[in-house]
Image (cartoon, grey):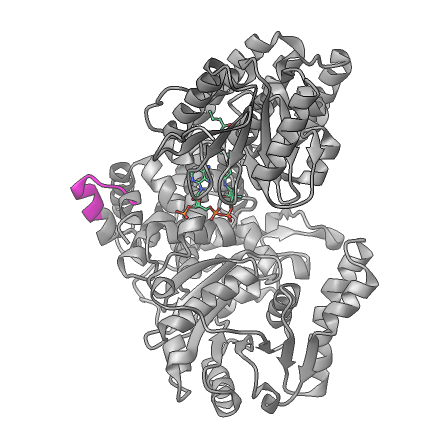
Amino acid sequence: MAAAIPDSVVTTARTGAILVVTIDNPPVNALGVAVRQGLAAAIAQAQADAAVAGVLLVGAGKAFIAGADIREFGKPAMPPSLPEVCRAIEDCTKPVVAVLHGAALGGGLEVALSAHYRLALPAAKLGLPEVTLGLLPGSGGTQRAPRLMGVKSATELMLSGKHLSAKAALAAGLVDQLVEGDDALAAGLAYANALLAQNAPVRRTRDIAIPDPAAALAELDALKADTAKKTRGLFSPLKIIECVQAAVQLPFDEGMALERSLFLQCIDSPQRAGLIHAFFAEREVVKVPEAKAAAPRAFASIAIIGGGTMGAGIAVSALDAGYPVTMVERDADSIARGRANVEKVYTGLVAKGRMTEEAKAAVLARYTGSTSYDDLANVDLVIEAVFEDLEVKKAVFKELDRVCKPGAVLATNTSYLDIDAIAAATSRPQDVIGLHFFSPANIMKLLEIVVPAQVSADVVATAFELANKLKKVPVRAGVCDGFIGNRILAVYRQAADYLMEDGASPYEIDEAVRGFGFAMGPFQVTDLAGGDIGWATRKRRAATRDPKARYVEVSDRICERGWFGQKTQRGFYLYPAGARTGQPDPEVLAIVDAERAKKGITPRSFTADEIMRRYMAAMANEGANVVNEGIALRPLDVDVTFISGYGFPRFRGGPMKWADMYGLPQLLADIEAFAKEDPLFWKPSPLLLKLVQEGRNFDSLNHSA
Ligand code: 3H9
């Protein structure tokens, strides 16, 4: 073997006539500048060394290459660019083989597509997921993938961002061979040597002609129409299609030039900034002090108290993750109802052909219903999901304290109650934590992990481990009314009510919010969730409400009529005969008018932009309060809460990232202007004031924990 380049993220070593080029840039061999330089140098070395007859590209560790180094985007570009590196690989006059044993994603797959031969091991994952980051494949992926796998499949791969298994990639034509095993180097060398022995030629993807261009263009037109509808408001999907059209119509080099220019447009787009922020934020949320300080407790069995919608959803989530689940209810009827709620989910999957009867039976075999707390003596982790009433919950926790073994984790799914008070009902507050699931709990990704004062660090770490097993997105929250999400929701929902009373119709507000990128507006959400839920909360808060604070009664008037939304076929909207899309209701507008008249308000008009400025200012300002009070650890925890649990458009990165991009001085100026109308509601957060004064943004706090 020839000597390797020392201390480099790309090393070369000759084995016989093969130059083995190893990319070793943990954790995922991302293509940072040093890797790009190393790859370019390695290809030059192969070209120059007469003893080298072929090149093998292999990734060290668990990945081949997971793509461009996302952390470099938005910073000045450093040469060589990845398209240049890919061109050098493809230009090489000696056969280049890539062996893929783990993630070969984005720029990583583009490197492989520039090689002349591709071998995959079973654990390989191939994809062009740039679209999920607001980008398009920018190193020839849009030009080379269609040549290898066909225009339609390649475009669908790029538009979906999906990962293909090695088997699927072989079937699609992205790789030439699949070999069993996990020794990438040995498999790659064997394959490369076999190719050399056969005098296999250099085979460049760019030289492949796309068959039947007219048919390909027709397929692209169909995809374009569909994409425009499905990815409303997103920038990069249609640009991907444009690039593929160029691959079909233009010579390779011109296609590459178009891809480069559209890639750079994507890089400059705020959507790229928002989506990449979301990518990193989702990986940062799990980094909390308790999980760093302590190892999780072992848990192998889960109990759920309460078989209503929430309890059943949590049970399904735990069953799906492979745990045995015991559900405790107060009597036989409730147990039957709980079991039916759980079974319904699996019956639905069977009906849709997504599960077999046998698989359903196997899952349900892990499920037990019981009316006795005594059956929980050996369980490791209990999640209470009974009626939202402090006294009821305290009674449950007294029982759990009586029966559960020492060290069992005792969790409550309350969405606003004081968990310190619940913990105090037991003799072991160190074991009590909040696990706030969102409905439907087997589907929604967000899990607020609510940390009361006395809980021990290993219980918090266990909650994060549970989230990982249940494939949830966990966010650490402190104890307060509503924790992170519902507390902020209450404030911007109020802003929406004020806008409505001041002159915008609920339908205009919903439209503006959808235009911003939310799937639904606040009044549609109320109708979906059931107006009675918010009504109960308002009644609960009535006693503690500041009598001087502005209170909009429209929702109460609607609820008094029994109009609770979709389930009663009318709320803010009309839902004739089970329709799920509402129609505006003139009677609701009359109620709004009457409330305005009662208060002597002369309605004024608001543009969509004016609506969103108030809506978002309320959200971001309360987000700042939540961070300032330590309820959220960092602004990014607020962002992830809203993206994962409240339908916040991911491409905007979350409310705090939105605020940074909007500009904190402008946000403060807006709030101060609104405060002239209502100083009690519009109070700038002390954190916002401080950051503006220091010339900093929210993101500066994300990196200090
Ligand atoms: C692209 O390639 C553009 C090109 O077309 C054109 C260029 C001109 N960069 O997810 P994990 C970090 S765009 C930097 O927890 P897993 C991640 O932050 C890119 N860092 O592990 C984390 O760091 P930390 C297209 C990256 O096993 C650590 O690695 N590629 C990158 O669950 C572990 O990550 C993609 O979109 C990166 N590219 O999943 C793929 N990727 O430990 C993005 C990861 O400090 N990556 N990190 O928290 C993934 O999908 C997953 O990370 C992967 C591993 C499946 C690879």
Q: Which of the pair 103/685 is nearer the observer? A: 103
The correct choice, above or below, for 612 with respect to 172 in the image is below
Question: In the rendered image of this protein, does residue 468 appear above or below residue 303?
Answer: above
Q: Nearer the viewer, residue 366 or 436?
A: 366
How many callouts does the rendering have?
0
Which residue is drawn at the image coordinates 57% and 30% (left, top)? Answer: 109
Magenta stretch, overall SS: helix
Residue in view at x 49 percent, y 44 percent = 61
The x and y percentages for residue 84 are: 46, 17
Instruction: Give above or below for 683 relative to 251.
Output: below
Instruction: Give percent across and percent down for residue 571.
Output: 60, 56
What quarter of the picture does the C terminus occupy? bottom left
| Residue 168 quadrant | top right
Magenta segment includes 556: no
Q: Is residue 230 shown left or right of residue 458?
A: right
Residue 225 makes an appearance in the image? no
Left or right of 164 in this view: 380: left
Residue 18: horizontal and vertical position, in percent?
A: 55, 25
Residue at image location 47% in from the left, 59% down from the top: 474
In which quadrant of the rendered view does residue 239 lie?
Answer: top right
Tell me if residue 310 can be seen. yes
For residue 356, which quarter of the picture? bottom right
- Residue 618, position in %: x, y? 36, 49
Q: What residue range appears in magenta? A: 689-698
Residue that appears at 61% across and 40% down:
125
Q: Viewer-proximal residue, 25 or 266?
A: 25
